[in-house]
Amino acid sequence: MTVAPTTRADVVAPTTRADALRARPAGFLHDVAAIAGRALRGVPKDFEGVLPPVFIALFFFIVNVATFSDSAGAGFDYKAFQMPTAILLGVTGISRAPALVLDVQDGYLDRLLMTPIRRLAILLGHMVADIAVAVALTIPILAVGFAIGVRFETGVPGIVVFIGLAALWSLAFTGFGYAIALKTGNPAAVNSTFLLFFPFLFLTSSYVPRSQLSGWLDTVAAFNPVTYLLEGLRSLVMVGWEWDDIGKALLAIAVLGAISMSLCFTALRGRTRRG
Amino acid sequence: MVNEVAIRTEQLVRRYDDFTAVDHVDLEVTRGEIYGFLGPNGAGKTTTVRMLCTLVAPTSGTATIAGFDVGSQPGEVRLRIGAALQEAALDPKQTGRQLLRLQGLLYGLPKRAMAQRVDELGDLIDMRDALDRPIGTYSGGMKRRLDLVAALVHNPQVLFLDEPTTGLDPASRTTVWEEVRRLNDQLGMTIFMTTQYLEEADLLCDRVGIINDGRIVAEGTPEALKRSVGADVIVVRVDGDAAPLRPIVEGLAGVQSVEAHGDELVIATENGSAAISPVAVALNGCEVRVRDLTLRTPTLDDVFLDLTGSHIEREDQTQETDR
């Protein structure tokens, strides 16, 4: 059987397939999946943006455990105590927001905005990819934790919930990155989003239990959502199913997420309005 | 009933703070027409296109594409348009095939039809083999061609091309012209293109709108616009400023209008052959040295000069001058 070669006339006048080539809305979930797929395909090309946080998290995890384990006292599992801190260091601020900035600069965001895709799907697609990346990043940190003897009191289901909370926190925090990306279109500004996490990380019980924080620091920690997130995560590792702590962790994520996503979607509206 | 008007704007305005980029523009482009939007840098061409492509909201006025309002029905508009903007809007980290496939996905094309369509589009721009390479490795011309076919994935009714040949070498420019003509001839696609190239507007467009400072200053077929200047044009280049020579030739028989621009005097006349001798004789007696004197038919640049008192200066011409 011989196949006739495609001619230019076939391309510009595809009469037999006119209906197949008719543009139509693809559907919201379909659009989110398409954008997420593209964002995930870009991750292996941006390893330089993904690996350093994991390296930093592992470095501090190992150094802190080596430094404070003995002084923590007998019976206190400092390795398990540090596990949630390491995970948060590894997954916070990881997002495809820098890639979105490049889309703004390359004009590719304009091309996306001219398709029938809903604006929200562009952001959500990136965020779905972020969740997948955050989950993947917890694996090497957990593996190192297991290797040095960390065990979960809640078993495998607890590990799953632990990873889920970490991924949700990562998602809540990415809202700031996307807000800055859409507002400024500046990669340097987006890359510095991680600095926002520093006060959250240090003004809380990251390295010592909350009972050992001094007066003013304890007061500040009480208003820091990371405090409740760490307590929720630690309960899964060190105590068991403490639903009260897990609920507070979820609430902390929700509050931060509500703030960051409001900023993010406001920035998206602003960008699409001013063109 | 099929809407015969593909693009219509009424009193379209876009302001950025105190600056009015597009100033009460009225347009009507019929289905199947190639409409050229001609003007210098900063005239408002790109802003108009961005409004018509739903990327920028108008400050006031209305614009419809195939009968759908860009402000209140942007989703309907987006289904019917394709656009290649001034800078190729591509993702350098994707391959050409990935980019075209994603375009197809977002326009809801079935996967089977899309695979075939991507290959066809690759053939159209003679880049089928290159489609599996990252776009970042493409040359400027390849990026332009890919950008053009990315706008065609879903076979749009109206195609916007914002300065599609700026920066291309002459051969690539000719290829783009051929494709634009073919899309229009064989598919009846309405094409709205902005350009700074007079030749491009003249050769390719059924009608041309000339825009300056955000306002449309003239509109019509290239022939009609050129006829409005006169049957012939005599161009005089001198050493020094040509403005003092203007009164000398203005009163001569057969001279319709005279524009001075730098060292150049552009004289519109009904009969160039008859008018050129009196012009030469009149200028012979003045102190300014005449470098050359040319008789030719009018161009769209002459139309622009006649209407605005300045030439359409292309970016690349300016750069060449700067160099």
Image: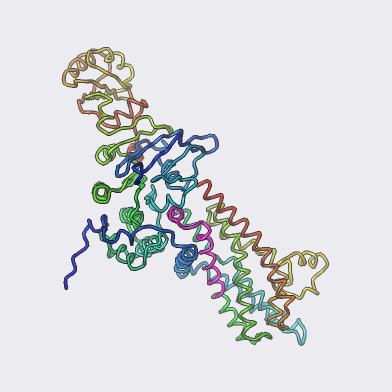
- Quarter location, residue B203: top left
**Of residues B108 and A152, which is closer to you in this image?**
B108
Q: Which residues are magenta?
A: A106-135
Q: Is residue B285 above or below residue A93?
A: above
Magenta highlight on residue A114: yes
Magenta highlight on residue A192: no
Residue B230 coordinates in the image, percent (x, y): 25, 23
| Residue at 63% over, 57% down | A262
**Of residues B65 and A245, which is closer to you in this image?**
B65
Residue B155 coordinates in the image, percent (x, y): 33, 55
Residue most extreme to the right: A215
Left or right: residue A77 compared with residue A185:
right
- Can you say which quadrant of the picture contains the N terminus of chain A? bottom left
- Quarter location, residue A84: bottom right
Left or right: residue B115 compared with residue B178:
right
Can residue B323 be seen in this snapshot? no
Residue A217 coordinates in the image, percent (x, y): 79, 66
Residue most extreme to the front: B1
**Of residues B234 and B45, which is closer to you in this image?**
B45
Left or right: residue A137 compared with residue A232:
left
Q: Main secondary structure of the magenta part?
A: helix
Left or right: residue B312 compared with residue A233:
left
Q: Is residue B43 above or below residue A275?
A: above
**Of residues A274 and B92, which is closer to you in this image?**
A274
Residue B172 coordinates in the image, percent (x, y): 26, 50
